[in-house]
Image (tube, rainbow, N blue to C red):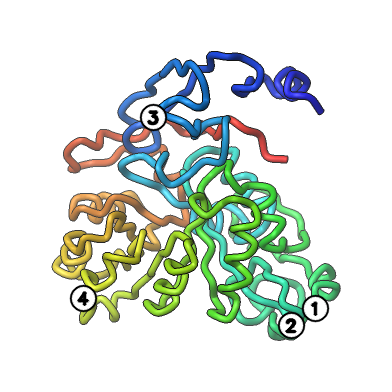
Amino acid sequence: MTSRVIADKYGIYPPTVFAMVTRTVLTGLTGLTSLTTLALTAPTGPLAPLEWGGGPLTVEALPRVVYTAHRGGALEVPENSMSGLVTAYERGTAQVIDVDTRILRDGTLVALHDETLDRTTASTGPVRALTLREWRDVRLRPGPALPGSWRPERPPTVAEILDRFGGRIMLMLEAKDPRSLRALGSLIRARGLTRSVFVNSNEPAVALRAHRMGLLAQLWRSQKQMLDDRPERWARFVDVLDVDYKARDRDLARAVNSGVPRVWAHTVTTPKQRDRVLRLGCNGVITDAPALLSRTPVKGVKGVKGVSAAGLRARWPVN
Protein backbone atom coordinates (compact mmCIF):
# COMPACT_ATOMS: atom_id res chain seq x y z
CA MET A 1 0.00 0.00 0.00
CA THR A 2 1.53 3.34 -1.05
CA SER A 3 1.93 6.35 1.25
CA ARG A 4 -0.73 8.23 -0.75
CA VAL A 5 -3.21 5.35 -0.38
CA ILE A 6 -2.51 5.17 3.37
CA ALA A 7 -2.95 8.92 3.65
CA ASP A 8 -6.23 8.91 1.72
CA LYS A 9 -7.58 5.90 3.63
CA TYR A 10 -6.88 7.24 7.11
CA GLY A 11 -6.76 10.98 6.51
CA ILE A 12 -3.17 11.00 7.79
CA TYR A 13 -0.38 12.50 5.75
CA PRO A 14 3.14 11.45 6.75
CA PRO A 15 6.32 13.33 5.78
CA THR A 16 6.76 11.11 2.69
CA VAL A 17 3.57 12.61 1.23
CA PHE A 18 4.28 16.30 1.80
CA ALA A 19 7.55 18.20 2.19
CA MET A 20 6.01 20.27 4.95
CA VAL A 21 4.00 18.68 7.72
CA THR A 22 2.11 19.99 10.70
CA ARG A 23 2.86 18.51 14.07
CA THR A 24 0.60 18.71 17.09
CA VAL A 25 2.51 18.65 20.35
CA LEU A 26 0.90 17.87 23.66
CA THR A 27 2.05 20.12 26.46
CA GLY A 28 1.15 19.77 30.11
CA LEU A 29 -1.11 17.05 31.46
CA THR A 30 -2.77 15.16 28.57
CA GLY A 31 -2.62 18.34 26.55
CA LEU A 32 -4.28 20.33 29.34
CA THR A 33 -2.24 23.48 28.98
CA SER A 34 -2.42 23.96 25.24
CA LEU A 35 -2.19 22.36 21.85
CA THR A 36 0.71 23.88 19.96
CA THR A 37 1.07 23.52 16.21
CA LEU A 38 4.57 23.51 14.72
CA ALA A 39 5.47 23.59 11.04
CA LEU A 40 8.45 21.40 10.17
CA THR A 41 10.24 21.76 6.86
CA ALA A 42 11.53 18.19 6.79
CA PRO A 43 11.63 15.09 9.02
CA THR A 44 15.43 15.42 9.20
CA GLY A 45 15.27 18.86 10.83
CA PRO A 46 16.34 19.67 14.40
CA LEU A 47 13.10 18.35 15.86
CA ALA A 48 13.25 14.98 14.05
CA PRO A 49 12.20 12.28 14.45
CA LEU A 50 8.60 13.42 14.37
CA GLU A 51 6.94 12.04 17.46
CA TRP A 52 3.53 12.17 15.80
CA GLY A 53 3.66 10.39 12.48
CA GLY A 54 7.21 10.24 11.15
CA GLY A 55 8.60 7.49 13.35
CA PRO A 56 8.01 5.67 16.63
CA LEU A 57 6.68 7.70 19.51
CA THR A 58 9.46 7.88 22.10
CA VAL A 59 9.90 8.80 25.73
CA GLU A 60 11.10 12.26 24.70
CA ALA A 61 7.55 13.13 23.56
CA LEU A 62 5.89 12.55 26.93
CA PRO A 63 4.29 15.62 28.56
CA ARG A 64 5.38 17.06 31.88
CA VAL A 65 2.74 15.03 33.76
CA VAL A 66 1.88 11.57 32.47
CA TYR A 67 -1.12 9.25 32.78
CA THR A 68 -0.55 5.50 32.45
CA ALA A 69 -3.47 3.13 31.87
CA HIS A 70 -2.74 0.31 34.34
CA ARG A 71 -3.40 -3.02 32.56
CA GLY A 72 -5.26 -0.86 30.04
CA GLY A 73 -7.41 0.67 32.79
CA ALA A 74 -8.58 -2.31 34.82
CA LEU A 75 -11.65 -0.60 36.30
CA GLU A 76 -12.86 0.37 32.83
CA VAL A 77 -11.78 -2.42 30.43
CA PRO A 78 -10.87 -6.13 30.71
CA GLU A 79 -7.29 -6.10 31.98
CA ASN A 80 -4.47 -7.11 29.65
CA SER A 81 -6.93 -7.86 26.85
CA MET A 82 -6.48 -6.73 23.26
CA SER A 83 -9.95 -5.20 23.17
CA GLY A 84 -9.23 -3.34 26.42
CA LEU A 85 -5.87 -2.05 25.19
CA VAL A 86 -7.38 -0.90 21.90
CA THR A 87 -10.13 0.91 23.83
CA ALA A 88 -7.58 2.62 26.08
CA TYR A 89 -5.58 3.69 23.05
CA GLU A 90 -8.57 5.00 21.11
CA ARG A 91 -9.96 6.94 24.07
CA GLY A 92 -6.67 8.82 24.29
CA THR A 93 -6.96 9.34 28.05
CA ALA A 94 -3.41 8.11 28.79
CA GLN A 95 -0.02 8.58 27.20
CA VAL A 96 1.30 5.19 28.36
CA ILE A 97 -0.38 1.78 28.37
CA ASP A 98 0.74 -0.76 30.97
CA VAL A 99 0.74 -4.53 30.32
CA ASP A 100 1.83 -7.43 32.53
CA THR A 101 3.97 -10.11 30.89
CA ARG A 102 4.60 -13.76 31.72
CA ILE A 103 6.53 -16.53 30.00
CA LEU A 104 5.12 -19.85 28.77
CA ARG A 105 6.82 -23.23 28.91
CA ASP A 106 8.10 -22.84 25.36
CA GLY A 107 9.49 -19.33 25.98
CA THR A 108 6.62 -17.35 24.45
CA LEU A 109 5.86 -14.09 26.26
CA VAL A 110 2.18 -13.41 26.92
CA ALA A 111 0.03 -10.77 28.61
CA LEU A 112 -1.33 -11.82 32.01
CA HIS A 113 -0.90 -10.53 35.54
CA ASP A 114 -1.28 -13.61 37.75
CA GLU A 115 0.86 -16.74 37.96
CA THR A 116 -2.26 -18.78 37.30
CA LEU A 117 -5.13 -18.55 34.84
CA ASP A 118 -7.80 -18.86 37.52
CA ARG A 119 -8.81 -15.25 38.24
CA THR A 120 -9.11 -13.69 34.79
CA THR A 121 -9.74 -16.60 32.40
CA ALA A 122 -12.11 -19.55 31.98
CA SER A 123 -9.16 -21.92 32.50
CA THR A 124 -7.16 -22.94 35.56
CA GLY A 125 -3.57 -23.79 36.36
CA PRO A 126 -0.16 -22.12 36.09
CA VAL A 127 0.59 -19.94 33.08
CA ARG A 128 4.15 -21.28 32.76
CA ALA A 129 2.82 -24.81 32.17
CA LEU A 130 1.32 -23.88 28.79
CA THR A 131 2.73 -23.83 25.28
CA LEU A 132 1.75 -21.22 22.71
CA ARG A 133 -0.59 -23.71 21.08
CA GLU A 134 -2.35 -24.30 24.41
CA TRP A 135 -2.36 -20.57 25.16
CA ARG A 136 -4.42 -19.94 22.03
CA ASP A 137 -7.25 -22.00 23.56
CA VAL A 138 -7.41 -19.80 26.69
CA ARG A 139 -10.25 -17.28 26.91
CA LEU A 140 -10.32 -14.20 29.10
CA ARG A 141 -13.35 -13.83 31.34
CA PRO A 142 -14.38 -10.14 31.62
CA GLY A 143 -15.31 -9.09 35.13
CA PRO A 144 -19.07 -8.60 35.69
CA ALA A 145 -18.52 -5.20 37.32
CA LEU A 146 -16.90 -3.67 34.24
CA PRO A 147 -18.93 -0.97 32.48
CA GLY A 148 -20.09 -1.80 28.97
CA SER A 149 -20.39 -5.12 27.19
CA TRP A 150 -17.33 -7.32 26.70
CA ARG A 151 -16.97 -10.74 25.12
CA PRO A 152 -14.57 -13.53 26.06
CA GLU A 153 -11.45 -13.34 23.92
CA ARG A 154 -8.05 -14.93 23.50
CA PRO A 155 -5.39 -13.17 25.59
CA PRO A 156 -2.64 -11.65 23.44
CA THR A 157 1.04 -12.43 23.22
CA VAL A 158 3.57 -9.69 23.91
CA ALA A 159 4.69 -9.79 20.27
CA GLU A 160 1.11 -9.08 19.17
CA ILE A 161 0.90 -6.11 21.53
CA LEU A 162 4.21 -4.68 20.33
CA ASP A 163 3.20 -5.13 16.70
CA ARG A 164 -0.13 -3.41 17.23
CA PHE A 165 0.86 -0.53 19.52
CA GLY A 166 4.63 -0.26 19.38
CA GLY A 167 5.70 3.25 18.43
CA ARG A 168 2.11 4.53 18.37
CA ILE A 169 1.95 5.05 22.12
CA MET A 170 4.43 4.49 24.94
CA LEU A 171 4.16 1.03 26.46
CA MET A 172 5.03 -0.18 29.95
CA LEU A 173 5.74 -3.92 30.10
CA GLU A 174 6.19 -5.49 33.52
CA ALA A 175 8.47 -8.51 33.47
CA LYS A 176 6.70 -10.65 36.07
CA ASP A 177 9.31 -13.36 35.59
CA PRO A 178 12.90 -11.99 35.58
CA ARG A 179 13.88 -14.97 33.38
CA SER A 180 11.95 -13.35 30.57
CA LEU A 181 14.04 -10.18 30.45
CA ARG A 182 16.38 -11.30 27.67
CA ALA A 183 13.49 -12.47 25.47
CA LEU A 184 11.55 -9.29 26.21
CA GLY A 185 14.55 -7.17 25.28
CA SER A 186 14.95 -9.07 22.02
CA LEU A 187 11.32 -8.41 21.04
CA ILE A 188 11.70 -4.70 21.80
CA ARG A 189 15.04 -4.27 20.01
CA ALA A 190 13.91 -6.20 16.93
CA ARG A 191 11.14 -3.63 16.44
CA GLY A 192 13.29 -0.56 17.08
CA LEU A 193 11.35 0.32 20.22
CA THR A 194 14.06 0.71 22.85
CA ARG A 195 13.00 4.35 23.43
CA SER A 196 9.30 3.53 23.25
CA VAL A 197 8.86 0.81 25.91
CA PHE A 198 9.48 0.91 29.66
CA VAL A 199 10.50 -2.44 31.16
CA ASN A 200 9.14 -2.65 34.71
CA SER A 201 10.21 -4.78 37.67
CA ASN A 202 10.09 -4.74 41.45
CA GLU A 203 13.74 -5.79 41.66
CA PRO A 204 16.53 -3.19 41.42
CA ALA A 205 18.88 -5.83 39.99
CA VAL A 206 16.45 -6.50 37.13
CA ALA A 207 16.09 -2.77 36.45
CA LEU A 208 19.90 -2.51 36.30
CA ARG A 209 20.05 -5.42 33.86
CA ALA A 210 17.41 -3.77 31.68
CA HIS A 211 19.40 -0.54 31.67
CA ARG A 212 22.59 -2.34 30.69
CA MET A 213 20.67 -3.97 27.83
CA GLY A 214 19.86 -0.51 26.48
CA LEU A 215 16.22 -0.58 27.58
CA LEU A 216 14.19 1.99 29.49
CA ALA A 217 14.22 0.71 33.07
CA GLN A 218 11.30 1.13 35.45
CA LEU A 219 11.34 0.09 39.11
CA TRP A 220 8.19 -0.21 41.19
CA ARG A 221 8.16 -0.15 44.98
CA SER A 222 5.49 -0.97 47.55
CA GLN A 223 4.46 1.17 50.50
CA LYS A 224 6.39 -1.14 52.83
CA GLN A 225 9.52 -1.17 50.70
CA MET A 226 9.52 2.61 50.54
CA LEU A 227 9.94 2.86 54.32
CA ASP A 228 13.61 1.87 53.96
CA ASP A 229 14.35 2.63 50.32
CA ARG A 230 17.15 4.98 49.33
CA PRO A 231 16.05 5.70 45.77
CA GLU A 232 18.97 8.04 45.03
CA ARG A 233 21.06 4.88 44.65
CA TRP A 234 19.04 4.00 41.55
CA ALA A 235 19.09 7.39 39.83
CA ARG A 236 21.89 6.42 37.43
CA PHE A 237 19.97 3.53 35.85
CA VAL A 238 16.23 3.93 36.56
CA ASP A 239 14.17 5.93 34.06
CA VAL A 240 10.89 5.70 36.00
CA LEU A 241 10.51 5.15 39.74
CA ASP A 242 7.05 3.68 40.23
CA VAL A 243 5.95 4.43 43.80
CA ASP A 244 2.97 3.37 45.91
CA TYR A 245 0.50 6.25 46.31
CA LYS A 246 -0.28 4.97 49.83
CA ALA A 247 3.27 5.73 51.01
CA ARG A 248 3.90 8.41 53.62
CA ASP A 249 4.44 11.98 52.47
CA ARG A 250 8.08 11.84 53.54
CA ASP A 251 8.71 8.65 51.55
CA LEU A 252 7.10 10.08 48.42
CA ALA A 253 9.11 13.28 48.84
CA ARG A 254 12.32 11.25 49.14
CA ALA A 255 11.50 9.52 45.87
CA VAL A 256 10.67 12.81 44.14
CA ASN A 257 14.01 14.29 45.26
CA SER A 258 16.07 11.20 44.44
CA GLY A 259 17.34 12.33 41.05
CA VAL A 260 15.30 9.74 39.14
CA PRO A 261 13.80 11.78 36.26
CA ARG A 262 10.26 10.35 36.43
CA VAL A 263 8.40 9.44 39.61
CA TRP A 264 4.94 8.02 38.92
CA ALA A 265 2.49 6.84 41.59
CA HIS A 266 0.53 3.58 41.41
CA THR A 267 -2.22 2.42 41.48
CA VAL A 268 -4.35 5.53 41.57
CA THR A 269 -8.11 5.16 41.19
CA THR A 270 -9.60 8.48 42.41
CA PRO A 271 -9.03 12.16 41.68
CA LYS A 272 -8.23 12.76 45.36
CA GLN A 273 -5.41 10.20 45.29
CA ARG A 274 -4.07 11.72 42.08
CA ASP A 275 -4.15 15.27 43.37
CA ARG A 276 -2.22 14.33 46.52
CA VAL A 277 0.68 12.66 44.72
CA LEU A 278 0.90 15.51 42.19
CA ARG A 279 1.00 18.04 45.03
CA LEU A 280 3.89 16.08 46.54
CA GLY A 281 5.80 16.37 43.29
CA CYS A 282 5.13 13.16 41.37
CA ASN A 283 5.07 13.79 37.63
CA GLY A 284 2.80 10.93 36.66
CA VAL A 285 0.09 8.53 37.82
CA ILE A 286 -0.55 4.90 36.96
CA THR A 287 -4.29 4.43 37.12
CA ASP A 288 -7.01 1.82 36.75
CA ALA A 289 -9.43 4.61 35.81
CA PRO A 290 -7.79 6.82 33.15
CA ALA A 291 -11.11 7.91 31.63
CA LEU A 292 -12.41 9.04 35.03
CA LEU A 293 -9.27 10.98 35.88
CA SER A 294 -8.99 12.55 32.45
CA ARG A 295 -12.38 14.22 32.79
CA THR A 296 -11.88 15.33 36.41
CA PRO A 297 -9.92 18.58 36.85
CA VAL A 298 -6.82 18.55 39.02
CA LYS A 299 -7.18 20.62 42.19
CA GLY A 300 -4.56 22.32 44.30
CA VAL A 301 -1.55 21.74 42.04
CA LYS A 302 0.25 24.81 40.74
CA GLY A 303 0.51 24.86 36.97
CA VAL A 304 -1.89 21.95 36.49
CA LYS A 305 -5.40 23.24 35.82
CA GLY A 306 -7.21 20.16 34.61
CA VAL A 307 -7.57 17.87 31.64
CA SER A 308 -9.05 19.04 28.36
CA ALA A 309 -7.89 16.48 25.81
CA ALA A 310 -9.99 13.41 26.61
CA GLY A 311 -10.43 11.42 23.43
CA LEU A 312 -7.26 12.73 21.79
CA ARG A 313 -5.39 9.81 20.26
CA ALA A 314 -2.08 9.19 18.55
CA ARG A 315 -1.98 10.22 14.91
CA TRP A 316 -1.21 6.79 13.44
CA PRO A 317 -4.03 4.20 13.48
CA VAL A 318 -3.79 0.87 15.21
CA ASN A 319 -3.51 -1.96 12.66
Q: Point out which mark residue 105 bears.
A: 2
Q: Are marks 1 and 2 in contact (CB under 8 Å)?
A: yes
Who comes first in sequence, dot 4 or dot 2?
A: 2
Callout 3 touching callout 1 (CB < 8 Å)? no
Q: Residues within 10 Å of mark 4 (few under 14, many from 20)?
A: some
Q: CA distance from mark 4 to mark 3?
A: 36 Å
Disc 1 crowd rating (10 Å Cα; few below 14, some 14-19, many 20+) is: some
Q: Earlier in the sequence, mark 3 or mark 1?
A: 1
Report, in whole angstroms, how far the alpha carbon at label 1 lies from the one at label 2: 6 Å
Q: Amino acid at mark 2?
A: Arg
The answer for how far apart the CA atoms under marks 3 and 1 are is: 45 Å
In this figure, which residue is indicated by the disc labeled 4? 230
Q: Nearer the viewer, residue 175 or 73?
A: 175
CA separation in Å, label 4 and label 2 = 36 Å
Per the image, the residue denoted by label 1 is: 131
Q: Which element type, helix, strand or loop, lies under badge 4? A: loop
Q: Secondary structure at mark 3?
A: loop
Q: Amino acid at mark 4?
A: Arg
The mark total stands at 4
**Mark 4–mark 1 contact, CB under 8 Å?**
no
